[in-house]
Image: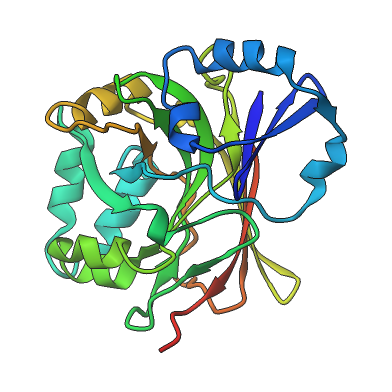
Amino acid sequence: MRLFKKKDQATLQHLDQCYSWKCDDWDDLINREGLHDYLLEKIKKLPRVDSSILNQSNFDPPINRQEVWAAGVTYLKSKEARMGESRKSGGDVFYDKVYDAPRPELFFKATLQRTVGTGDNVNIRKDSTWNVPEPELTLFINSNGNIQGYTVGNDMSSRSIEGENPLYLPQAKVFERCAALGPCLYIPQNPIDEEAEILMEIRRNENLMYKDRVRISRMKRTHTELVDYLFEECEFSHGVFLMTGTCLVPNDEFTLNVNDQIIISIDHIGTLVNNVSQLER
């Protein structure tokens, strides 16, 4: 089943049927044990609505008071890209080590304030010369540390800033409209299929600039491993979203431009679409 958020309306798609209701507390709705079974029971008391309600081009990100965190260097290609961009500064050794280390790289990414949904704009930094999207399977984990759902994530990244010095990672990752989630929260009865694919396209003036895909099974670390480290010394009273890393990396000559379109799809979840903009002052 897929749960969509639009202002105070929640819409659930299940077995080709749609149900919609006013949701006064998104956090209370999603942050629970057995979310899949709870929603199955809930829709028994809800009237069906026309599925055309899902035809709109924009939805809110499926987040409210949750934080967004991210994992880095979880795919071999990501390790190689990070090492390449930081070699000149001597920082490449850190990415090499973390790929094989027991402890993963985890970092804070955003809250709702800096997170957008499908159909909205993501930003690139004006003080960065090399900007890329990072398409990532994103977990929703409840406050007890159990994975309840999945969404599509875009961890916007300023590669020139991170490559200059690994200590600049927060500036490379955290800025206005730096994260995108959507189009929905996918809530299966069992964990997502490991053979599910992530597909990313980047278009510029209707021209295809990049297209590639990868199976999530290519990730070195397991989802539960990342969750265990995230919850080791942190509590998340409303649950938390965790981006799990990327393996789709455009070549080193590519950087995003304003008005580029980023299209990220993950099997079973859906498609997240964002255009590129910059912060106006």
> What is the image's colouring?
rainbow
Q: Position of residue 132 (x, y in %)?
A: 45, 64
Q: Residue 22: which quarter of the image? A: top right
For the residue pair 263 and 14, the one nearer the viewer reads as 14
Write down the quadrant of residue 261 in the picture. bottom right
Front-lying residue, 253 or 102: 102
Where in the figure is residue 64, as x and y percent of width and height?
Answer: 43, 45
On the question of residue 138 being in view, the answer is no
The part of the image, by quadrant, that contains residue 10 is: top right
The foreground one among 245 and 281 is 281
181 over 17 or under it: above or below: below
Which quadrant is home to the N terminus? top right
Relative to 157, is 9 above or below? above
Q: Residue at image x 39%, y 45%?
A: 77
Quadrant, the C terminus = bottom left
- Residue 135: where, in percent of width, then height? 50, 49
Q: Residue at x 13, y 51 (%)?
A: 93
**Could one spot residue 227 in this view of the protein?**
yes
Q: Residue at x 33, y 44 (%)?
A: 67
Q: Furthest-bottom residue in view?
A: 281
Q: Is residue 120 left or right of residue 231?
A: right
**Left or right: 41 with respect to 46?**
left
Q: Is residue 184 above or below residue 280?
A: above
Residue 118 in the image: above or below residue 237: below
